[in-house]
Image (tube, rainbow, N blue to C red):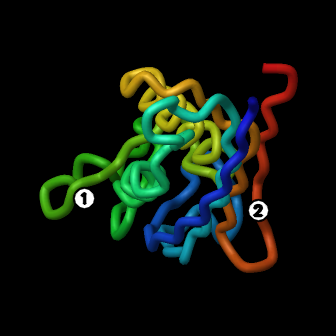
């Protein structure tokens, strides 16, 4: 039997886009919202596909953090005062969606859960989001 779950998590973080010309080239913050859909077989003993709190914990690692491209020259300066989460490219909604899905899938494997992310949305404002859909897994 295939089960599906959904979890929404919100966090606050700042970012900037190093290789972008426009407002997002300046360091600024968002109230991010992440919607996660997962699918798989629930654990036989617990009946749980994936613990909702685990999903929340993984995404909330980004709460009140600064997200920068690892190539950004601001990383070294800011790290002298505050931790920085660096990304392998621009910290866009699109990239964050992929990173969150990878982290969630890795945690499922580590914990022995038979679950995978099937869809994930990352909103950087109430009116725009990036979505990644994993079809045919």
CB atoms at circles 2 and 1 under 8 Å apart? Answer: no
Residue at 46% in and 48% down:
51
Figure check: 105 above or below 52: above
Of residues 115 and 131, which is closer to you in this image?
115
Circle 2: element type: strand
95 vs 62, left or right, is right
Gap in Å between the C-alphas at discs 2 and 1? 27 Å
124 vs 73, left or right, is right
Residue at 61% in and 68% down:
33
The residue tagged 1 is 78
User: Residue 82 occupies which quadrant of the picture?
Assistant: bottom left
39 vs 78, left or right, is right
**Residue 100 image position (x, y, % from top left):** 54, 43
26 vs 130, left or right, is left
Quadrant of the frame with the C terminus = top right
**Residue 87 image position (x, y, % from top left):** 46, 39
Q: Residues within 10 Å of mark 2 (few under 14, many from 20)?
A: some
Circle 1: element type: helix
**Residue 70 image position (x, y, % from top left):** 41, 37
The residue tagged 2 is 129
* Mark 2 or mark 1, earlier in chain: 1
């Amino acid at each position: 039997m295939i089960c599906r779950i959904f979890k929404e998590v919100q966090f606050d973080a700042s970012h900037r886009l190093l290789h972008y010309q426009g407002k997002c080239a300046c360091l600024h913050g968002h109230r991010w919202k992440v919607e996660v859909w997962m699918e798989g077989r629930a654990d036989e003993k617990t009946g749980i596909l994936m613990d909702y709190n685990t999903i929340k914990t993984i995404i909330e690692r980004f709460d009140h953090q600064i997200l920068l491209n690892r190539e950004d020259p601001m990383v070294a300066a800011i790290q002298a005062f505050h931790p920085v989460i660096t990304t392998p490219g621009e910290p866009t909604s699109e990239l964050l969606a992929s990173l969150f899905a990878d982290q969630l899938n890795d945690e499922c494997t580590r914990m022995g859960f038979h679950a995978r992310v099937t869809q994930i949305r990352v909103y950087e404002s109430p009116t725009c989001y990036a979505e990644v859909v994993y079809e045919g897994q």
